[in-house]
Image (cartoon, rainbow, N blue to C red):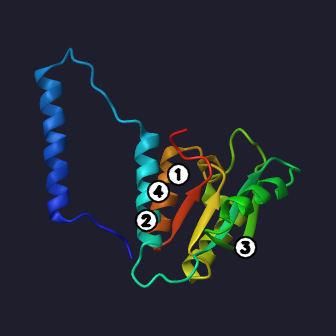
Amino acid sequence: MTRRSTPETQSAMDCMDWDNRTQAWLYPNRPQVQPDPRLRLERLRRNFMRAAVEGPGRTRTLRVIAYTLTTPNGHPEPDHARLRAYAEGTWDIKRAIHDEAADPNHPAPPQHRNGWLAARLLLRQGAADGVIAISRNMISPDDAQYEHELAWIGDHFSFVDLLVPESL
């Protein structure tokens, strides 16, 4: 199931786009301030999380997957220990999954990692309600890829929670 904008939302976005273009045309020398994409991604993630956590009929502790991305020959246990400490009393960790990045500076896209695909499968099957990670870089440092993964997870009524929010 995918989420689509309603006609009211779409027309509101169109009006805002029109207003922004008009302002840029009327005041070409005024600096045009662009919102920080990290804040937009953080809001998107928190909205999906709120929808999953505050869903109707939620009475049980939500089940999560602790996900980490390690360096070559790195050990995921220190990161998983941090995630377990973070989840204590809030989430029930069902699985701890990790991937190993061949190049830590340029990790493979999330859709090309076996561990991440296993996490997505568990979310799709309903075996878990969300994913927790230390930072968004564990999922993807690329804004478009990260947003794509957030949208997929949100479309499956799941969530992502991070120890370090996108805005930091």
Quadrant where the N terminus lies?
bottom left
Per the image, label 1 sits on a secondary structure element best described as helix
Q: Earlier in the sequence, mark 4 or mark 3?
A: 4
Above or below for 38 versus 43: above
Report the residue that reaches farthest toward the right. Answer: 73
Q: Amino acid at mark 2?
A: Arg
Q: How far separated are the C-alphas under marks 4 and 1?
A: 13 Å
**Image disc number at residue 50:** 2
Counting from the top left corner in percent of width and height, residue 58 is at 47, 81
Viewer-nearest of labels 1 and 3?
3
For the point 13% across and 25% down, the residue is 25
Q: CA distance from mark 2 to mark 4?
A: 9 Å
Q: Viewer-proximal residue, 109 or 54?
A: 54
For numbered disc 2, what is the local secondary structure? helix
Q: Which residue is mark 1?
A: 145
**Tag 2–tag 4 contact (CB < 8 Å):** no
